[in-house]
Amino acid sequence: MAAKELKKSDFQGWLGHDKESAQGNMVWGEFPHPKEFEETDVDIEITHCGICGSDIHTLRSGWGAVPYPVCVGHEIVGRAVKVGSKAEKGIKVGDRVGVGAQNSSCLRADCEECTSGLEQHCTRSVNTYAAPYPQGGMSYGGYADYHRCPSHFVYKIPDSIPSEEAAPMLCGGVTVYSPLKQNGCGPGKKVGIVGVGGLGHFGLLFAKALGADKVVGISRKSDKRADVLQMGADEYIATDDDENWAKKHSRSLDLIICTVSSPKMPLNKYLQLLRVKGTFVQVGAPEDKLPEMSAFAFIGKGISMTGSMIGSPAEVEEMLQLAADKKIKPWINKYSMKDANKAIVDIEAGKARYRISLVNEKHL
Ligand code: ZN
Ligand code: ZN
């Protein structure tokens, strides 16, 4: 495959021009300020892009002001069509590659985060979309034809993982894989995953793959029970079904990953589920504050409360390898890139089982 020189007009995608775009009103158009190509970059011809909750929070300015027009999508898979002479990882033109929620960080030798495998927490981190690069240009996401990304944040996709399954792992997958790994998920641990949506379903699959003694899915409605058990969970708690659920299952888990992004979550009850010295990790990001909690909720059992944001490049690669080795099968609905507006409406209506991948047919 020959390298491809992209023109500015090649960078087109679904643009959100205002808050209303989140209701399925994105408009296809050219990116106003794509980044200039640097020798450390890779240009990607997009074949697939997963839909993440962040996309919708961003389109509607839910987490704060947004530099419209934006093109969202940070679970990108495609083919490398141009690779800079200083690109990392031996990426070649024609390789199947992916990009997650982060596009850039400073990578300086004096950066505490970048030198310790915590690039996602670098103060100079650039998100995959709706963010300015320090050297000029804006980042635009993957509901699009092409994506330009510094190679440090571009990942080779293992051959055995289909593109539509790899895409949602790049943000959704690593967002739960990282805290599971960092907090010792594995043999000897009983792990709960709160919220069985896109993130939560990955939580169940990865907790099982990492060898936890027991994996418990926790969500509101009982209609997800069969799916959760089929994903490999040992147990399912439907909190709408039994008002005594917290008491009944109290002190039963070592680690809880909470993917819920509604501020109305029953946080104090979730904490009841932890054993002494257990850990609660919040990964969902409500637009509002978390519920109030009593100090006794964590003093009483000496529990830890922590948070986690996406994962590092090294963790993304580790996760992809685990998914390939253990043949992890995410549950995906495919939509055409042409139907991106319908897809974001459907995902907001809770219709995804459990993650949506957009397919850009013209680049297949
Ligand atoms: Zn995301
Ligand atoms: Zn840095």
Image (tube, rainbow, N blue to C red):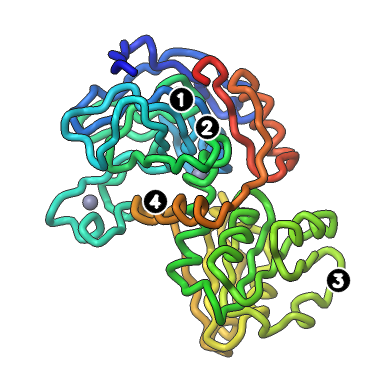
Q: Quadrant of residue 309?
A: bottom left
Circle 4 is placed at which residue position? 317
The residue labelled by disc 1 is 46
Give the amino acid type for the residue marked by disc 3 in the picture.
Asp
- Whether label 3 lies within 8 Å of ligand 1 gets the answer no
Badge 1 vs badge 2, beta-carbon distance below 8 Å:
yes
Q: Amino acid at mark 2?
A: Cys
The residue lying at 32 percent from left, 32 percent from top is 149
Q: Nearer the viewer, mark 1 or mark 4?
A: 4
Disc nearer the start of the sequence (4/3): 3
Query: Residue 242's mark?
Result: 3
Image marks 1 and 3: residues in contact by CB distance under 8 Å: no
Q: CA distance from mark 1 to mark 3?
A: 45 Å
Left or right, residue 219 beside residue 339: right
Which numbered marker is on residue 49? 2
Q: Earlier in the sequence, mark 1 or mark 4?
A: 1
Q: Secondary structure at mark 2?
A: strand
Task: From the image, state whether disc 2 or disc 4 is nearer to you.
Answer: 4
Give the residue at the far right of this rendering. 241
C-alpha gap between disc 1 and disc 4? 19 Å
Please report whichever mark, 2 or 4, sits nearer to the chain's N-terminal start.
2
In the image, what residue occupies the spot 52% across and 24% down?
A: 16
Task: Please name the residue shown 20% across and 61% down the image.
Answer: 112
